[in-house]
């Protein structure tokens, strides 16, 4: 679905299987964020086609973190597509994070991540995002903040009335609280989480932060 000009969100709504929401950013550098499980990639291909977009136009693929339901499908994209993940998360994936793939029976991406992101500016041609390091759900989770449009793409750091679990390898509740407290200071009109519904409106998002932090602290 088209959320804003050049910003498309493809939510995963099935209760029968786990997968993540996927984001597509059109423009000079067509970008996909969190392509999800490989076996469900057809869901994204079909949804993009309905919006007149083609997944083979993607030139930048980014994972908010390394869990299988967010990046297993990275191997779909060939060498012409730049693949990115947080620098800390990449190290985690190569060590403790790989345990989750053994537990779930999924296959970790074989093709390498050629860009390892750290906190700061991310230029996608005609769009500028801010990479925010938000550990907690995993050690190297990142969020993307599109300041111009007041959009936060939060991965599994926080959802509508919820947060990413911290009982998986590398999870840390105290770090997650700190990350959410930091995000709560941003000017956000659209919260695009890794699971569940998009949250719209500054006041609704502010109350969401209050409710989440009230339950965690």
Image (cartoon, rainbow, N blue to C red):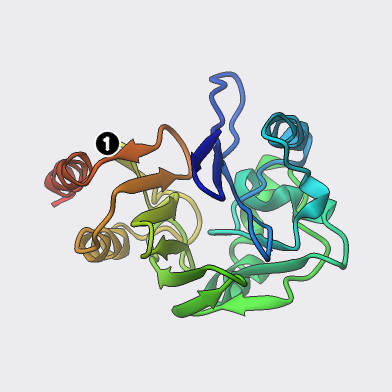
**How many numbered badges does the structure rendering display?**
1
- Circle 1 — which element? loop
Q: Is residue 179 left or right of residue 157?
A: left
Name the residue at 38% across, 54% down: 151
Give the position of the N terminus as an image quadrant.
Answer: top right
Name the residue at 72% across, 67% down: 83
Q: Name the one closer to the observer, 48 or 159.
A: 48
Residue 14, visible in the rendered structure = yes
Name the residue at 40% across, 63% down: 145
Image quadrant in which you'd find residue 106: top right
Q: Name the one closer to the observer, 13 or 69.
A: 13
Q: Is residue 35 left or right of residue 142?
A: right
| Residue 18 position within the rendered picture, expressed as x and y whole percent measured from the top left | 59, 31
Assess disc 1: are there few (<14), some (14-19) or many (≥20) residues with their C-alpha within 10 Å of its C-alpha. some
Q: Is residue 16 left or right of residue 144?
A: right
Residue indicated by mark 1: 161
Name the residue at 67% across, 34% down: 51
| Residue 76 position within the rendered picture, expressed as x and y whole percent measured from the top left | 83, 51
Residue 164, visible in the rendered structure = no
| Residue 62 position within the rendered picture, expressed as x and y whole percent measured from the top left | 63, 61
| Residue 87 position within the rendered picture, expressed as x and y whole percent measured from the top left | 57, 77
């Amino acid at each position: 679905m088209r959320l804003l000009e050049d910003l498309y969100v493809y939510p995963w709504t099935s209760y029968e299987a786990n997968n993540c929401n996927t984001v597509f950013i059109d423009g000079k550098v067509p970008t996909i964020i969190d392509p999800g499980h490989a076996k469900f990639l057809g869901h994204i291909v079909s949804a993009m086609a309905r919006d007149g977009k083609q997944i083979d136009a993607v030139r930048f693929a980014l994972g908010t973190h390394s869990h299988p339901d967010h990046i297993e499908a990275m191997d779909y994209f060939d060498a012409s597509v730049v693949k990115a993940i947080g620098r800390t998360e990449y190290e985690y994936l190569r060590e403790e994070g790989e345990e989750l793939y053994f537990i779930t029976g999924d296959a970790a991406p074989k093709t390498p991540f050629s860009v390892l992101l750290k906190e700061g500016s991310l230029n996608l041609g005609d769009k500028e995002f801010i990479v925010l390091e938000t550990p907690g759900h995993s050690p190297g989770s990142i969020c993307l903040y599109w300041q111009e449009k007041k959009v936060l793409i939060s991965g599994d750091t926080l959802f509508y009335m919820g947060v990413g679990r911290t009982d998986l390898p590398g999870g840390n509740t105290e770090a997650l609280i700190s990350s959410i407290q930091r995000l709560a200071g941003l000017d956000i009109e659209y919260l695009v989480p890794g699971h569940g519904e998009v949250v719209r409106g500054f006041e609704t998002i502010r109350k969401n932060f209050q409710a989440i932090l009230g339950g965690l602290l």
